[in-house]
Image (cartoon, rainbow, N blue to C red):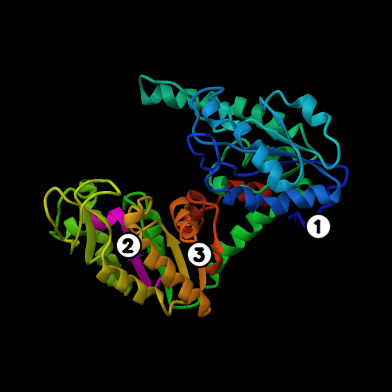
Amino acid sequence: MQTIDNFNFAGKKAIVRVDFNVPLDENGHITDDTRIRGALPTLKKILADGGSVIIMSHMGKPKKNPDMKYSLGQIVDAVSEKLGVKVQFAPDCMKADEAAAALKPGEVLMLENLRFYAEEEGKPRGEFATEEEKKAAKAAMKEPQKEFAKHLASYADCYVNDAFGTAHRKHASTALIADYFDADHKMLGYLMEKEVKAVDNVLSNIKRPFTAIMGGSKVSTKIGIIENLMDKVDNLILCGGMTYTFAKAQGGKIGSSICEDDKLDLALDIIAQAKAKGVNLVLGVDCVAGDAFSNEANTQIVPANNIPDGWEGMDAGPKTRELFANAIKGSKTILWNGPAGVFEFDNFTGGSRAIAEAIAEATKDGAFSLIGGGDSVACINKFGMADQVSYISTGGGALLEAIEGKVLPGIAAIKGE
């Protein structure tokens, strides 16, 4: 497989799939530039070699073409500043032939949001009367999707995939485009290489004890990874909103807390699996409850299984934080995906901060810690602790699928698998 270090981009046009799906505020300003900074080494290597760069990415989930709320034009100046090169902009990713052809060595062109075209994802838009109609419409998009990928490929001499965050999607720009380049002219970028290595460190080079922390609101979205990890971890901490599904499943009273009532049996099954496999399953025992979903809510600390009516669990309580910290400290491999509470509200960051501090302490003592998933990354950045963990992944869904052991189409397309 070709590697970016071994490839000389001199005189070559490289089309690079990055993940610049960055969060913006109401004025279109970037609130977290982690993903842009992550792609810089790859972009700079191409330019330093004497090549030119065509950047392509998606942003958000636009339902029409164009939807300026999701225009990448909003971040061109920020990318130019970070890259140290003025970035040109093509306002339509399918009409950039002339701009791409005119690129000179050292120049950079960014294409407009790929998802303005339904062909990027290969998913038809609109309403369908039946599931059969929807399937037929999706099947009809296969050829247009290939043509879309072929057109993008025509802009460049080589292809670099540096978008780990979308590596689990078989989209035109993440997988199909690779078919139009031979094995010597397609490769993973530096960020992708680091991501693949980090996942491998967690799954193939486990130093014990191995502790995984899974947070978030719904157990249903994490069930695949929870079941996969059950055969690998020593400690499994389940926190965040899913806490209350587990509490209710065991007969607890959870007030108005978030709960998946159709997943109560699943929660009990996970508890049974952990017991059968000798996994130390750590669940919250107390919580910070609020009388409204608001940073200004009145609060009280109550047992996680005895929350009063009209109150909802918003964060892990002090006893729970201590339990989590004790499980994390002393660990040698740590994976964290998902916060312990509504960390977006400053008054409910305590549980997530306790996890972050325990991970930082364990990392200082020699553990390998991998933080992944948008909310966990936002947490660690909010607390200013990004430099105190081993690796921060730019991928949410991609990271989870990789840890589940699934083949990621974006990586397989480069490796020729």
Q: Which residue is mark 2?
A: 238
How far is disc 3 from disc 1 in space, using C-alphas?
Answer: 34 Å
Q: Secondary structure at mark 2?
A: strand
Three-letter amino acid code at disc 3? Met
Check disc 3 and report the residue beneath it. Answer: 385
Q: Residue 299 in the image: x percent, y percent?
A: 21, 56
Q: Evaluate if marks 3 and 1 touch, with contact meaning CB atoms under 8 Å apart.
A: no
Distance, label 1 to label 2, CA atoms, is 43 Å
Element at badge 1?
loop
Q: In this orientation, does residue 118 appear?
A: no
Q: Is residue 391 above or below residue 168?
A: below
Front one among 310 and 95: 310
Is 78 magenta? The answer is no
For residue 209, which quarter of the picture?
A: bottom left
Q: Residues within 10 Å of mark 1 (few under 14, many from 20)?
A: few
Query: Which residue is at a point 34% across and 66% down the rendered structure image?
Result: 237
- The type of residue carrying mark 1 is Asn
Residue 74 in the image: state x and y as whole percent.
60, 33
In this rendering, position of residue 182 left or right of residue 191:
right
Which residues are drawn in magenta?
232-245
The residue mark sitting in front, 3 or 1, is: 3
240 in the magenta segment: yes
Label 3 secondary element = loop
